Amino acid sequence: MSSSAQDTIFGFSTPIAKGAAVLLLMVAVTVFLFSVPGDGSGPHNSRILVQKFYFLPLLLAAAWFGFRGAVVATMAVTAVMAGLIVANWPGNPEAHVERMGEVGVFWLVGALAANFFEQQTKHLNDLKSANENTLYVLASALDVREENTGLHSRRVADYALRLAAEMGIKDPDALAVIWKGALLHDLGKIGIPDNILLKPGPLSEDEWEVMRRHTEVGFEMLADIAFLQEPAEIVLYHHEWFDGTGYPRGLKGNEIPLGARLFAVIDVFDAVTTARPYRTPESHLGASAILRQNAGSHFDPDIVKCFERVPFPDWEGIASRNSTTLFRKATS
């Protein structure tokens, strides 16, 4: 289970929602516990059976909040157990002893569960970090090979996340797909011969035919890797045009996956605002004008509008963190 899947188990994705779920379960079990017949002497005592349902909120608290959550939940259960003993005193001593023993089991299970889930979280975070570092290496290998792109892959990945935020995309899994797809968008260029990839002048039509294959090559490299199957769609479709004249499939409008439509804007923005041997970089305002001019043909016009709502300092900060200078206006 991925860390994001663990975070959203049963549909609860925020700390408040998770805390409310644990509390609701705790209250439900407590109400049920006090509504069943009082302590009896038989082996099938109703309350003794019902109180075992406390393991569910306790385990959820441990999974979602670690040791702190387990301690708080177990203390709440302990208070309920103590309340039952007091309310039924002297009652059935055997039931009281069993209930006190169950409290000890609750504390043991809470501690073990919290330790297990925290170890799992650490393992998943380490695995996630290792995966991200591997992706960085792949992207950096291409950036170094192309010589003139610098930190292009990292920069556009950060740009893409900022635009996604402006578009209201908040789901962690969706953002991860966009980030990975942006980072690896040109991975297929590893399969393009140097005499074409590094050619300083214009490409011939035959050479362009070879160059356009990089989207499919990149897709084929990633599509069989489970956690990269969705990002692979961005790699495949980021050169599709909104009017259907792009490649490799000639998709049009909403046929193009949202992540690919989003990234198409970012890819061109970064391409025109960074220096290349054959041209000087555009300013932010100049790049924005290019995006507007091509909204509806190359780009999704709604995404271009979202791009323009992002304050210039946000783009400038991302560029600076990735060793690039971004100018608001053209310098003379």
Image (cartoon, helix red, strand yellow):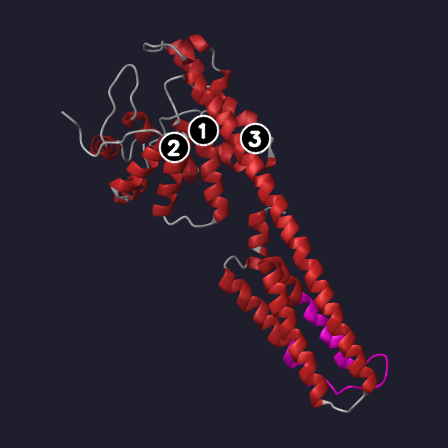
**Residue shown at the point (75%, 68%) measured from the top left:** 105
Tell me if I can see residue 95 in this picture. Answer: yes
Q: Which residue is mark 1?
A: 185
* Amino acid under disc 1: His
Mark 1, Cα crowd under 10 Å, few <14 / some 14-19 / many 20+, is many
Marks 3 and 1 sit apart, C-alpha to C-alpha, by 13 Å
Q: Could you tell me residue 58's position as x and y percent?
A: 65, 66
* Amino acid under disc 2: Val
Task: Give the structural element (helix, strand or loop) at label 3.
Answer: loop
Q: Could you tell me residue 235's position as x and y percent?
A: 47, 29
Q: Is residue 289 above or below residue 200?
A: below
* Amino acid under disc 3: Ala
Is the Cβ of the residue at disc 1 closer than 8 Å to that at disc 2?
yes
Quarter of the picture holding the C terminus: top left
Q: Which residue is mark 2?
A: 156
- Using residue 167 as the reference point, say whether residue 190 is left or right of it: right
Instruction: Give the magenta-colored segment's residue range.
Output: 29-56
Q: Nearer the viewer, mark 1 or mark 2?
A: 2
Q: Is residue 156 above or below residue 58?
A: above
